[in-house]
Image (cartoon, helix red, strand yellow):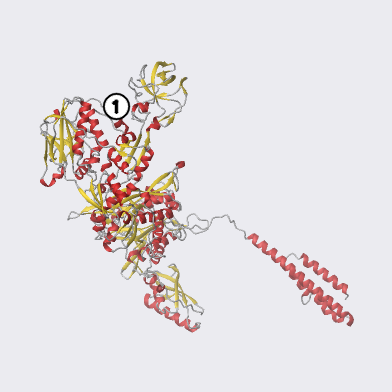
Amino acid sequence: MTSKNIDNLRDSLLSKIESAADLNSLDDIRVSALGKQGSLTALLKGLGKASAEERKPLGQAINEAKVKINNAIAIRKEFLDAQALDLRLASETVDVTLPVRPEQEGKIHPISQTIDEMVAIFCEMGFEVAEGPHIETDFNNFTALNIPPEHPARQEHDTFYLPKKEDGSRLVLRTHTSPVQIRTMLSKKPPIRIIVPGRTFRADYDATHSPMFHQIEGLVIDQSTHMGHLKGCLIEFCRTFFGVSNLPSRFRPSYFPFTEPSAEMDIGCSRKGGGLTIGAGEDWLEILGCGMVHPKVLAACGIDSNLYQGFAFGLGIERAAMLKYGIPDLRTFFDSDLRWLQHYGFLSHDIPSVARGV
Amino acid sequence: MKFTFSWLKEYLETEASAIEIADRLSMLGLEVESIDNAAEKFAPFLICEVIKVVGHPNADRLKLCILEIGKDQVQVVCGAPNVREGMKGVFAPIGSTIPGSNIVLKSSKIRGEVSNGMICSEFEMGLSDDHDGIIELSESAPVGDSWAKWAGFDDVIIEIALTPNRGDCASVRGIARDLAAAGLGKLRPLEIPKVECGFDSNVKWQIDFPKDCKNACPFVIGRMFRNIKNGESPGWLKNRLKSIGLRPISALVDITNWSTFALGRPLHVFDVDKISGNLTMRFARQGETLKALDEKEYKLEDGMIIIADDNGPQGIGGVMGGADSGCSAETKDVFLEVALFDPVRVAETGRKLGILSDARYRFERGIDPTSLEWGTEIASSMILKLCGGEASSLTVAGEEPKWKRQQELRTSRVQSLGGIDLSAQKQEKILSALGFEAELSGQEIKCKIPPWRPDIEGEADLVEEVMRIQGYDDIPALPLPNNAVVPAPARSFEQQRIENVRRVLAARGLVEAVTYSFLDSENASHFGESPDELRIANPISADLDMMRPSILPNLILALSRNQARGLEDVNLFEVGPRYTDDSPEGQTTVAGGLRSGNTNSSSWIAKTEPIDIFHVKADVLAALSAGEAPTDKLKVTRNIPEWYHPGRSGSICLGSHVLGQFGELHPRLLSVMGVEGPVAIFEVFIERVPSKRSKSMKDKELLTLSQFQPVNRNFAFLVDQNTDAERVLRAVRLVDKEIISNVELFDVYSEDVGKGKKSIAVKVTLQPTEATMTEKEIEMISDKILASVANQTGGILRS
């Protein structure tokens, strides 16, 4: 054995390793070199036959060759492993453009969403949600609201009636959410600060009227609230609801039997280009009716109008939703057309709050 | 209420422009509905004379006309049958916009002949529907001048929406008064002429009402005129009426219309030759009828005020006169009626008869009770001026009702109620300008209410008067004072959990619908019996005549409509009311929903399955969980109403309370309601879930997590086919509630297990808390499980 033999064997093995085509042949090379019967192992075993002074340098050379070969095997193995993985992964390729598993997307109706938005805003101003029945007494729906039987406003309301009772009285489907004012004032002592979203009914059906629609009513009763607060509260509401911080607004005198003084609130809009945009513009849009609660209404609820006063307001929820979300037709709200509901509806996690913006 | 700017200026001395006036009107509470600047619109149109007319060489029905307009001459092609040489008409030059059609006129060739403009019809001017011929102007019309100016159309027409309380502004003069009070000019005083009268009227007034109905017509004045001539009105009067869309008829009728609009004082005139005897104000009698001025026959009822002569009704008080006693061109003697009627009765009568007249509009809002006297004199003088003849002395019945009322205004109230800081002197000035006799004394203004303001009833009304004249813009907007920096929840626990149910159902892939609270009684009847008290007495249509006993029928009808649109997989829900009686308690908020068609329709990857009841059972359980129901205490029973498939439906109960129902829609109803199956439906009675006060830490028990390895053991039990799975699960659970932490049913099948039997496979999780379980302990629990299932259900371990 000479160092030349060792070098030759090493080089031959290294070249074999380099060209090993796969892991199996690489392992075969490893065994043929380093196994019990391996060629390098044989050299190591043959060392004993060498002379004493040759043994050390030869042993050293064999060991060096062994290290080199082990390294080469490791490098080659790594390469072959990577190559095998590439091959496997290539065979696992799928068509990533295929569609996903279908998931049904539920939606929240725009009316529910709009009510939630309004509740979130009024909550910030200290209002609580109050409710009342849809089937109402004539007293709560009209008389207590200063609409006596002969009042022209009764006719304007196009009331739905239930059958006449034995005593001659007739229940009505509430024509507005205002009877809940009466119910609240009859059952609760001031201070009162409520909003009342809910269904209302009028016997009218055309492009802009539906026999059922929704209103939201507001009522504030205490000892000092006046029209300045009414203005402040409603301006704040409209600006937040429509998301227009500089929304122009104006209050015009008007008439409602249950408020005095009464007002209608207009907000700024633009009708340029055929569409309608809420915000600063050349035009006004009537948005709600409001006023200071009429002393006769307070009296009907047993509240002393010398001590207490406050304001009330009401607006249409569908109309507000139509304006905010650009929904063109009132009647479509109640069609339950799945395509419409999917398009105009809201995701379930989209819960309005002032924190995230309504 | 319509009026023109120039008409307004008859009563209001003002420098303000029409636009300023309109802007202020809205801010006074007299909301401007439309403003039509006719002066601007009509500006291009000139008076022309037709100089020459020759036939069009290429068209039989067209003519070539040479027109003179001032110094110029132009040729136009005209097709009007009435065009002729020498006539005067309205010329529209090139570039003008035709009001009736909004078309901009261009120079053109019509069948080869040049046409440089147009001679216009009333239709083209937007004045009427008449397009049979061109407008013919009188010979005196000055050629080349502005037609609108000459004809009195160079005006601005303003229409306001009058609120029901403001009868005083149903007149041009009343509007002028409000504007003057607001500082936009000076109200000209009303001149009340004194009429000379020479003879006694042939017709006398009588009032005949029951004692308790004297206010039906408390006061009426009449006057006869003889030897009058009822011709055409003068141009100025005709133009006033035309400008607000009224058709001039004859001098007498035009005077009554003028008085109605100018002064808010409706009048009526009878042809004396057509009435017999005296005139009486009384209630109509059963069976009486009247042909009114609109030529329609009306059936009169008791309670309606009529004006009757010896032959019967000749007019409906405050609503409309009769056709047979009306005035015509032949009328020689006329009787003028100036009356006061009860607003409520006029409104009721008008409504019952379906008549909305200009008189009713004013009487039902309440008119000035002093207007009878001055109205009679103004109308009399006009009749004499326009129709000649002579006037009788007055015939009067009843008396002017007492209208003088007083109301105090504490000057502090404008601030404390209205939010405007306004001096007492300013308040007094405003009220005086509105016609109140206002006297400031100390902290109070004593106001005598003018007769034209029956709507002023209390102090708040005076506050409003002061504020609307001052302007609501002057109210400083203030934030609503808040007691709490962080507000309390707006919704109560009961209200919020309903919202939670809504959100959870949407999160489960259901789409929220909002449907009417009513439906047709036929479809309602399939979902429980509705009492007659819930039938709407006056439905807008027969298919909306019953308050809904359930949300389901409306959703099923919605499903049917969606299926008709080609949508197959429909998942709808609604959270809303159902009605079981007419009391407040009879209305409850429930959640209802349906699923139809398939899950995962047309997916290449997910398995497509028809909808079944376990889809909606999951909806009910999720809704109940969101509704804060104690889910661990719920039981499923088979006690269900008849609109569900009897074998494929169930109720979810808490004790004896049914909290939810689910199942397949009864197959009978599929065809009855026109829908394709499968349809799985559910109802959740959220309000029956026992209420908790609020969410708090007490809702969550302290959690102890075991550090020991859990053990799973599977069992397959053979039970009778009709054994409910729930019984097996319960039998397992009750063996040891501490250690058995979970029981899952993972398989059910009845093939190859023997007739009348089924196999139920469950995975039981044992979770020790003290130490890891030994094989022996596991064995013991397993044995107990087997014994319990055998004991409770007769089930045996399948070998």
Q: Is residue B344 above or below residue A54?
A: above
Q: Identify the amino acid type marked 1.
A: Gly
Is A294 on the left or on the right of B92, as rendered?
Answer: left
Q: Can you see residue A335?
A: no
Is B164 on the left or on the right of A28, as rendered?
Answer: left
Percent across and percent down for residue A185 are 28, 61
Q: Can you see residue A230?
A: yes
Q: As rendered, which of A2 and A142 lies closer to the eye?
A: A142
Percent across and percent down for residue B194 are 19, 32
Percent across and percent down for residue B164 are 27, 45
* Residue positioned most to the front: B442
Element under disc 1: helix
Please give the residue where the numbered disc 1 appears in the rendered image. Answer: B235
Q: Chain of mark 1?
A: B
Percent across and percent down for residue B598 are 44, 56
Q: As rendered, which of B8 and B283 lies closer to the eye?
A: B8
Q: As rendered, which of A316 and A29 lies closer to the eye?
A: A316
Q: Which residue is found at the position 30% from the left and 29% from the top?
A: B239
Q: Dot 1, crowdedness within 10 Å: few (<14), some or many (≥20)?
A: few
Q: As rendered, which of B761 and A244 lies closer to the eye?
A: A244
Q: Quadrant of residue A229?
A: bottom left
Tag count in the figure?
1
Q: Quadrant of residue B29?
A: top left
Is B717 on the left or on the right of B590, as rendered?
Answer: right
Q: Is residue B621 above or below residue B439?
A: below
Quadrant into which the N terminus of chain B falls: top left
